Image (cartoon, rainbow, N blue to C red):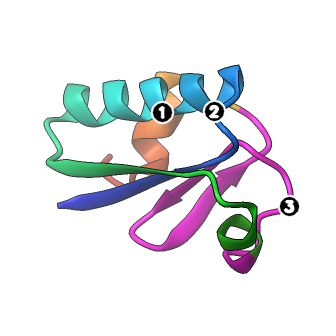
């Protein structure tokens, strides 16, 4: 099971990233758990300075933008 974390304060871009990540995981048939992290201290602890950010299985895969669904699939490490 993939652990997908969305880092950000809950802005429109953060919500869009969550939707894109879920869409990619579902399209690939990947079992996943989605967690949204909004605490600034925890975001900084993960080394992220720009949100939204995508973390997959504990590794920061993207920060500062929203990828396409296809790119998100690659970032999930399933293709």
Disc 2 residue crowd, few under 14, some 14–19, many 20+, Cα 10 Å? many
User: Looking at the image, which residue sits at the far bottom?
Assistant: 45
Reply above or below: 5 against 42.
above
Q: Name the residue under label 1.
A: 18
Q: Quadrant of residue 21?
A: top left
Res 49 label: 3
Residue 26 colored in magenta in the image? no
Nearer to the camera, 65 or 71: 65
Horizontally, residue 53 falls left or right of residue 73, namely right
Q: Are marks 2 and 3 in contact (CB under 8 Å)?
A: no
Determine the residue positioned at 77% across, 71% down. 44
Marked residue nearer the N-terminal end (2 or 3)? 2
**Gap between marks 2 and 1 measured at Cα:** 6 Å
Determine the residue positioned at 25% across, 52% down. 33
Q: Do the residues labelled 2 and 1 touch (CB within 8 Å)?
A: yes
The stretch in magenta equals 45-65
Q: Position of residue 58 (x, y in %)?
A: 47, 73
Q: Where is residue 39 in the image (x, y as percent from the top left)?
A: 65, 60
Determine the residue positioned at 53% across, 34% down. 71
Q: Mark 2 points at which residue?
A: 14
Q: Position of residue 19 (x, y in %)?
A: 44, 24
């Amino acid at each position: 099971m993939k652990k997908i974390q969305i880092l950000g304060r809950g802005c429109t871009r953060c919500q869009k990233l969550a939707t894109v990540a879920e869409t990619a995981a579902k399209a690939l048939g990947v079992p996943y758990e989605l967690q949204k992290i909004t605490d600034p201290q925890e975001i900084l602890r993960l080394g992220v300075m720009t949100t939204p950010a995508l973390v997959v299985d504990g590794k920061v895969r993207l920060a500062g933008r929203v990828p396409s669904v296809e790119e998100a699939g690659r970032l999930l490490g399933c293709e």
